Image: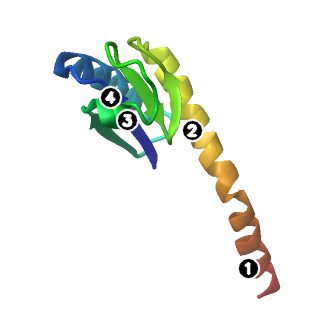
């Protein structure tokens, strides 16, 4: 699961960024149909300040990593961020997968 947060106190900005995220997700699903993305809209300045001080324009957080600050991201770069998040998730799970494989082999 990829967790995405849109940081902006202006609804039209969140809407525009969300549409870009959904378009990128749909493109990525052509090659990775299993991809799951959770999108949360952060609307208050107090919550946004946990990630960035830029509140006038939208920012984007993917898996608790600030990837875009104070601008509207392009679909192609969002696809790359999603792909990177998928690789990082696989890397985190790799030791667990190796242990499961070792357990299967010893059975």
- Whether residue 61 sits left or right of residue 103 in the image: it is left
Mark 3 and mark 2 lie on one chain; the one further toward the N terminus is 3
Is 6 placed left or right of 65 in the picture? left
- Mark 2 highlights which residue? 85
Q: Cβ–Cβ below 8 Å for labels 1 and 3? A: no
- Snapshot quadrant of residue 87: top right
Disc 2: CA contacts within 10 A as few (<14), some (14-19) or many (>=20)? some
Tell me the element at label 3: strand
Specify which label sits upstream in the sequence, 4 or 1: 4
Distance in Å between CA atoms under marks 3 and 2: 14 Å
Q: Is residue 35 visible?
A: no
Where is residue 34? Give x, y as percent. Answer: 45, 48
Residue that badge 3 annotates: 5
Q: Which mark is residue 22?
A: 4
Dot 3 crowding, Cα within 10 Å, few <14, some 14–19, many 20+: many
From mark 2 to mark 4, how far is it between C-alphas? 16 Å
Residue 9 x, y percent position in the rendering:
24, 24
Q: Earlier in the sequence, mark 1 or mark 3?
A: 3
Q: Which residue is mark 1?
A: 104
């Amino acid at each position: 699961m990829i967790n995405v947060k849109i940081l902006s106190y202006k609804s039209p900005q969140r809407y525009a960024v969300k549409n870009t995220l959904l378009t990128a997700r749909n493109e990525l699903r052509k090659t990775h149909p299993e991809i799951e993305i959770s999108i949360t809209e952060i609307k208050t300045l107090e919550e946004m300040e946990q990630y960035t001080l830029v509140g006038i324009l939208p920012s984007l957080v993917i898996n608790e990593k600030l990837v875009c600050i104070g601008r509207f991201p392009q679909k192609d770069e969002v696809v790359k961020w999603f792909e990177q998040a998928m690789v990082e998730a696989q890397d985190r799970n790799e030791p667990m997968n190796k242990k499961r494989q070792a357990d299967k082999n010893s059975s």
